[in-house]
């Protein structure tokens, strides 16, 4: 494995955050689990219901799938009585595309069907380019891109941060329809500043929390509850444009503990090292040819 | 039960026998008591040798609790409250005033020591020795302590006497204190029932009194001494707008399209998810469906819950305490049953291993045979 901070000469440099990148901040302590974001996501992305029970009565997916780009999951321990408590408590977690700073799916895609917008950093999908190899599905450390196995002409489906709604001045539906401000939308640098501000609050204080957008002007007052002193997504996997705050450990919420080096950077470093100037492949090919040639002669 | 007794009570109250029994049954149903209890209540009411004496003290209050009680409209209620119990002292309703009223209170305490019900509405100011509420030249604190120790039970009527209410709102300049705390501090052990609300629903009070008259004990109480039949559930659980909450449909501001459509008021600061009361079930004012705060389009402000009404900002969002059906969530780690496929795979592997083992043994046997022949 390549050490994160000592870049070998051939290593690919880590990608920096795009200055005007947009994203979301999800604060698990503020979330009440009403799932307004899930229903808004389905409404505005026009995705059908997803069933996990045989009666097909309720739209109740168990995870992100090709029809569910956004989902609220529950962490529960013991009695589950107290919110944001690891033992005998419960907490919610919202899962959707993290819009990584250095996305593994984009790196793995052989045909650039997945691409990161150079202006706002949204990782979007182009169905015309996709060949259906599903490398992105395997590459993603968050298990986000989903393939439509059930369709004759399948596509990859995932959250694209409601980029189709932005022309009209709208933004991510999940943030726009969150009643508590648990999910807020905005520029990543503003969201990071907001997250840092919240970690500095003392539990029990009455504070103003932005609703819908980080700098949209709408706020709600809330008594601060204790945080885990970490912003998930600030550095994980090279950084993400969706950030998380929580009252319980992030691993408990199913968020993987990733190194600061992104998978894309690591794999590209290995690949670029091997193929540098095509020297290693040529030498290797030469060796193979020699071996075959020698063995062939011996058999004659 | 003798029809004669009922007939006499009916005559006395000016209601028909049928109406009287109906009222008793409704009260019994309201408390969730079993069928037939209505008759028991009717019997208790008609047979009572002496109507239970009640002394009603008022401290820092607005008389809203009394007003709410007077407006209960179940059959000729005002007759019933005046004839069911013996209201020996009530500052607003007493016919006598001044020294006469105070004398009635003193006489009732003396006569009914340990038997009367004490109702208190209003918080008790304790700051500066309680001088912020004086009645007949004495502090409310003094009067309460004197009266409480001789009472059979105390009903704290309304939010103020239950947990402080409006007068105790920050910065609480008069040191407004709930009844229970005053008693605990003074070492008085008389049991306290709280009927919080601003104003409280009169039927919760009436049901508690009737329960007491019928069974000679207090109803089952929760940890804040509220009767469980009335305060056992969250407003959120029985709210008629709950389906909108579950579907993520919220009114975003007063008068907007979603508000007019009757969507959930959570985003406007509804405290239903953290407030225990039976408002959505029994409504207010007896004027038909939808007549309670949330029904009229105003978010619940949490008057029955300690630390919510008058303490939590009006439009700040409620926190959700209980995750109740029909809310179901996928878990972070979803425990899925082992599928038939996995079972088949295991079985196939076992079968394969067994086949291989048998095959090997057979092979060895074969080899041995071969060796033997050689």
Image (spheres, coloured by chain):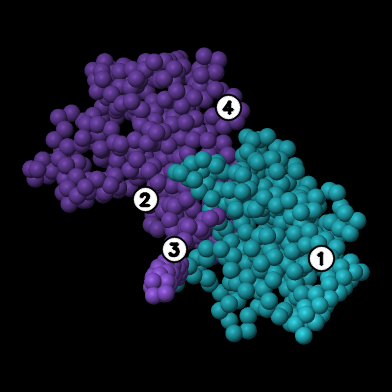
Chain colours: A cyan, B purple
Q: Which mark is residue B282?
A: 2
Residue A30, image x and y in percent? 62, 48
- For marks 3 and 2, give the CA distance: 48 Å
Q: Give the residue at mark 3.
A: B338
Query: To which chain does the residue with label 4 belong?
Result: B
User: Nearer the N terminus, badge 3 or badge 4?
Assistant: 4
Circle 1 is placed at which residue position? A271
* Quadrant in the picture for residue A55: bottom left
Q: Depth check: give the residue in front, B276 or B371.
A: B371
Q: Secondary structure at mark 3?
A: loop
Who is closer to the viewer here, B224 or B196? B224
Q: Quadrant of the N terminus of chain A?
A: bottom right
Chain containing the residue with disc 1: A
Residue count near mark 3 (Cα–Cα under 10 Å), binned few <14, some 14–19, many ≥20: few
Residue A24 pos. (x, y %) = 71, 57
Judging from the image, mark 3 belongs to the subunit labelled: B
């Amino acid at each position: 494995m390549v050490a994160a901070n000592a870049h070998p000469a051939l290593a690919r440099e880590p990608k920096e955050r795009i200055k005007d990148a947009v994203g979301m901040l999800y604060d698990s302590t503020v979330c009440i689990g009403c799932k307004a974001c899930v229903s808004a996501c389905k409404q505005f992305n026009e995705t059908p219901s997803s069933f996990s029970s045989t009666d097909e009565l309720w739209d109740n997916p168990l995870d992100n799938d090709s029809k569910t780009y956004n989902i609220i999951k529950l962490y529960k321990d013991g009695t589950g009585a107290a919110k944001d408590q690891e033992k005998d408590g419960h907490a919610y977690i919202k899962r959707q595309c993290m819009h990584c700073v250095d996305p593994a799916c984009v790196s793995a895609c052989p045909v650039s069907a997945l691409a990161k917008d150079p202006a706002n950093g949204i990782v979007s999908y182009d169905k015309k380019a996709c060949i259906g190899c599903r490398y992105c599905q395997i590459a993603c450390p968050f298990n986000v891109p989903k393939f439509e196995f059930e369709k004759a002409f399948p596509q990859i489906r995932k959250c694209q941060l409601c980029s189709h709604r932005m022309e009209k001045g709208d933004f991510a539906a999940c943030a726009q329809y969150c009643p508590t401000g648990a999910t807020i939308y905005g520029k990543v640098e503003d969201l990071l500043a907001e997250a840092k501000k919240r970690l500095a609050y003392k539990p029990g204080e009455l504070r103003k929390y932005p609703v819908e957008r980080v700098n949209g002007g709408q706020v709600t007052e809330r008594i601060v509850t204790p945080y885990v002193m970490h912003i998930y997504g600030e550095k994980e996997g090279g950084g993400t444009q969706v950030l998380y705050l929580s009252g319980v450990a992030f691993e408990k919420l199913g968020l993987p503990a990733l190194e600061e080096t992104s998978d894309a950077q690591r794999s590209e470093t290995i690949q670029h090292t091997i193929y540098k100037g095509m020297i290693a492949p040529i030498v290797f090919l030469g060796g193979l040819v020699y071996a075959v040639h020698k063995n062939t002669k011996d058999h004659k | 039960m003798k029809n004669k007794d009922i007939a006499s009570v009916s005559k006395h109250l000016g209601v028909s026998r049928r109406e009287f029994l109906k009222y008793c049954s409704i009260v019994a149903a309201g408390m969730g008591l079993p069928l037939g209890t209505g008759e028991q209540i009717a019997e208790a009411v008609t047979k009572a040798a002496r109507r239970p004496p009640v002394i009603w003290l008022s401290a820092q209050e607005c008389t809203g609790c009394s007003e709410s009680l007077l407006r209960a409209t179940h059959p000729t209620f005002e007759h019933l409250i005046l004839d069911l119990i013996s209201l020996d002292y009530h500052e607003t309703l007493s016919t006598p005033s001044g020294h006469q009223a105070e004398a009635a209170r003193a006489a009732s305490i003396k006569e009914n020591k340990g038997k009367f019900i004490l109702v208190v509405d209003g918080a008790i100011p304790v700051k500066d020795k309680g001088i912020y509420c004086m009645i007949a030249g004495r502090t409310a604190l003094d009067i309460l302590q004197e009266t409480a120790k001789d009472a059979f039970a105390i009903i704290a009527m309304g939010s103020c006497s239950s947990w402080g209410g409006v007068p105790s709102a920050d910065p609480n300049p008069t040191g407004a204190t709930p009844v229970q705390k005053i008693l605990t501090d003074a070492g008085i052990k008389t049991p306290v029932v709280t009927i919080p609300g601003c104003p409280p629903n009169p039927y919760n009070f009436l049901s508690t009194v009737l329960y007491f008259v019928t069974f000679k004990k207090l109803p089952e109480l929760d940890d804040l001494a509220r009767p469980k039949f009335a305060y056992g559930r969250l407003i959120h659980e029985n709210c008629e707008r709950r389906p909108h909450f579950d579907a993520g449909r919220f009114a975003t501001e007063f008068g907007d399209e979603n508000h007019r459509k009757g969507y959930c008021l959570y985003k406007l600061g509804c405290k239903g998810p953290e407030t225990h009361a039976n408002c959505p079930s029994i409504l207010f004012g007896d004027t038909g469906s939808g007549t309670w705060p949330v029904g009229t389009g105003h978010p619940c402000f949490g008057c029955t819950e300690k630390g919510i009404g008058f303490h939590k900002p009006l439009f700040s969002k409620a926190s959700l305490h209980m995750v109740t059906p029909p809310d179901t969530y996928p878990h972070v780690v979803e425990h899925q049953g082992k599928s038939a496929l996995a079972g088949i795979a295991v079985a196939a592997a076992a079968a394969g291993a067994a086949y291989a083992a048998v095959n090997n043994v057979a092979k060895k046997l074969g080899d041995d045979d071969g060796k033997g022949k050689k």
